[in-house]
Image (cartoon, rainbow, N blue to C red):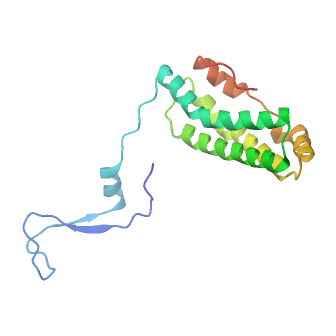
Amino acid sequence: MKRAAGMVAGVTCLVATACTGAGSPTAVPLQVVTPATSAAHSARPAAPRLTLVQARVEYSRLSVAFNAAVATVNQDARNGTTWTKFKADVLAAAAANRAWARKVRAVHWPVQVQPYVNAMLKTEVPAEIQCYNAMAAAGSLQGAAAAFGGDSFCRDSTATADKIRSILHLPPTIG
């Protein structure tokens, strides 16, 4: 994570000799810590890219909560439920998708996977979240079904996710 650019510069007393009790340093060199020098000392090296095997495990691990939320919404749609429960489940799926995206964005994926992850995070994930929000705002089960069938954000395309899963030797996305 990057440090805030507006870091406050500070002055530190280096212990080459002692600082006197009156608050004035005695023959002590002062060092001005600027955002550039402070950032240089605190910058962490970039995490190495995952191997394909590590990426397979990590992608699967990160997807558990989101896949469970989607499975719940799909079960609601198949088996029927109350509007209140469906709306809560759809909003939970949207929240799980946002959390999943944050976690996926933080990973340094293998070079074969990273462009697909970037594309999915830029287009498909925001569309899915907008679809969930449209269904939740519909006001009824029938309205949610109409939103799902008619909203352009709900035109589910798993092509990029399936490409990632194929590269990682994972099964296709859940339906």
In front of the other: 69 or 166: 69
Q: Is residue 71 visible?
A: yes
Where residue 95 sits: x, y (%)? Answer: 66, 47
How far from the left and from the top, in percent, is residue 91?
73, 48
Q: Nearer the viewer, residue 22 or 168?
A: 168
> What residue is rendered at 63% in x and 18% in y?
166
The C terminus: image quadrant: top right
Q: Quadrant of residue 100?
A: top right
- Can you tell which quarter of the image residue 168 is in? top right
Q: Residue furthest bottom?
A: 22
Residue 164's spot in the image, x, y percent? 62, 24
Percent position of residue 157, x then y: 77, 30
Is 156 drawn above or below residue 164 in the view shown?
A: below
Image check: 91 left or right of 28?
Answer: right
Number of numbered markers = 0
Q: Nearer the viewer, residue 144 or 128?
A: 144
Q: Residue at x 14, y 79 (%)?
A: 24
Is any part of residue 134 visible from this angle? no
Report the side of 140 relative to 123 (left or right).
right
Q: Is residue 75 above or below residue 86?
A: above
Residue at image position (56%, 37%) is 104
Residue 69 placement, left or right of 8:
right
Determine whether 146 is above or below 14 in the image.
above
